[in-house]
Amino acid sequence: MSNNSKESKFVPYVSASKSLPELTATAIILGIILAIVFGAANAYLGLLIGLTVSASIPAAVISMAILRGVLRRDSILENNIVQTMTTAGEAIGAGAVFTLPALFMWDLDVSQLFIIFVALTGGFLGVFMMVPLRQLLIVNEHETLPFPEGTACAEVLKSGEEGGSNAKLIGIGLVIGGAIKVLGDGFKLFKTEVETSIVGFKNAVVGLDVFPALLGVGYIIGPRVAGQMLGGGLLAWVVLIPAISFFGGNATVAIFPSEVPIGELDAWGIWDNYIRYIGAGAVATGGLITLVKTLPMLFKSGMDTIKGLQSNKGQLKPQPIRTERDMPAKYVWIGILAIILIIAFIPVTEVGFIGALAIGIFGFLFVTVASRIVGIVGSSSSPVSGMTIATLLIVALVYSSVGYTGMKGMIAALTVSAIVCTALAVAGDVSQDLKTGYIVGGTPWKQQVAMMIGVVASASVIGFILILMNNAYTIGSSDLPAPKAALMKILAEGVLGGDLPWTLIFIGAAISITLEFFGLNSLTVAVGIYLPVHTSAPIMIGGFVRYFVEFFAKTKEALKERVDRGVLLASGLIAGESLLGVLIAVLIAVGVKVPETAAMASNLIPLLLFLALAGFLWYMASKKVKKNV
């Protein structure tokens, strides 16, 4: 009774009695296109730095510019469907690149069918498992669970008349990010990596990747997180690498895992042979620490959700009004059961009954708690990495105990983790989308169907993108480190086979534990340790831009406007570079070659170009915008 009274107090932007165009052919076509675009962009970004960015607000702005500005269609619910489908691409990209690239690092012949199967099953499970929770988490706890990204996106949709100027910012970012990528990595007119050694300090190196996407990421995540990432990079490149070089420089034999003596290795050789294992240990421990720190919240969230489901008797209560109609409960439960049985018995993945059962258990457990956690702290702070690591370790131990070891066991454990990771990513994003829909007055079942269409669209191309990027740049190399997937590879090898340098991994684990006592976010710093400092440095510059944009804002209104404008331009930079990176990979794959020019030797040109881009980002974010009266 109390729940119904709570529901009755909230009135959505579009009332339940009003019917507007929503799941239309136009919205579906535009949503599919944006789902593929942002899925590809986030796949590239995840392979590069192990992070992805939210696509909901850029997608909402782009959809408003096209539907409202170009096609003259005036339905906020259509815009909501488009951004819902777009986030499916983002989630599929994240789930895939955080796990599946490990298969390429094992030099396996990975088929597109396998990748599509993993992405589809994980994506569908994420949607289905979230449906029974919508009434509890989105409706009943509307006042207590803010779902920050979903609420912010709803505000953007409600202020749709500003879509034209905002969309222009994304467009400018797309053009600039893409142009710099083409001129640098395409036509080779200048170096895209600046590097210098520190005089008198053997093998101490600092550098900068001239990537617009990294500048955009730094602006979005802010100076504190960016600073901790750079701190990890400096720890690796000006502390650990010189230390290893100093203490092992006189060794006459190779020290495992390197095959040559340390004295013969430069900074990159030490990073490749030693630092990556230390970084992997730090990242794994940081992820588990994040998971442990959220255990009280996990437990409470799980208990609250179970109580809520029990009060509903595990059913989705049919509602007569449009804004409360979910997908029918029987189809949801049948869908979940069918997917788990398909995973168990269809020989695409060969995870067996044990793997399918683990996917069902860990999938529903972690989707349940993750959906509530993103409602509190947002998707970017959800411990997806920790939950995926926990899944991988437990499943690997179970496989090992029944004698399912070696490469087959490692592939099976990684597959289970990939499906669960994808389900978690999709469930977190669909939770935010359903919150947006609840505020603006969307129809839940139409959003849920739209999310599934987005999953199909993005899953159908993610395999092509991964294979393409591997053929062009080699996943696991310094060009595309794929840090999260490399971590999954190392953990699987450690439990189910292979000879790992455990001392290096334990050193990384000890570093993460020490960082926690310093009051730092160990996972953030650990990612910085694993990645080359060349990646963290441009992210820090983006963080500095965000800091100065905020510092010079005189009012809260100006602060919000400046930050939001910068986020849209930064999102355009990320999407522009990422998409052109995929296009360049296509050209490389078909054998197109562009001769290098003399300008490639200069460090000054790319450095000045990057600093000019940072200044432009600050200028455009801080620029005063004339309001239409």
Image (spheres, rainbow, N blue to C red):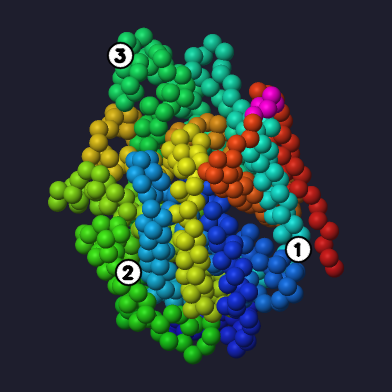
**Which SS type dominates the magenta stretch?**
helix
Q: Position of residue 532 (x, y in %)?
A: 50, 32
Which image quarter is the N terminus in? bottom left
**Which of the 4 quarters of the picture holds residue 516?**
top left
Q: Position of residue 374 (x, y in %)?
A: 47, 60
- Kind of residue at badge 1: Gly
Picture layout, residue 574 above or below residue 82 = above
Residue at the (27%, 69%) spot, across then down: 341
Sequence order check, earlier mark of 1 and 2? 1
How packed mark 3 is, by other alpha carbons closer than 10 Å (few <14, some 14-19, many 20 or more), is few
**Which of the 4 quarters of the picture holds residue 188?**
top right
| Closer to the camera in the image, 478 or 548 | 478
Which residue is labeled 2 in the image? 339
Q: Which numbered mark, 1 or 2, is in the foreground of this view? A: 2
Which residue is labeled 1 in the image? 164
**Which of the 4 quarters of the picture holds residue 344?**
bottom left
- Kind of residue at badge 2: Ile
Picture layout, residue 406 above or below residue 233 = below
Whether residue 531 is visible here, answered yes or no, is yes
Whether residue 144 is visible here, answered yes or no, is no
Q: CA distance from mark 2 to mark 3?
A: 52 Å
Q: Position of residue 460 (x, y in %)?
A: 47, 61
> Label 3's element?
loop
Q: CA distance from mark 1 to mark 2?
A: 42 Å
Span highlighted in magenta in the image: 596-600
Which residue is labeled 3 in the image? 253
How many numbered discs, if any?
3
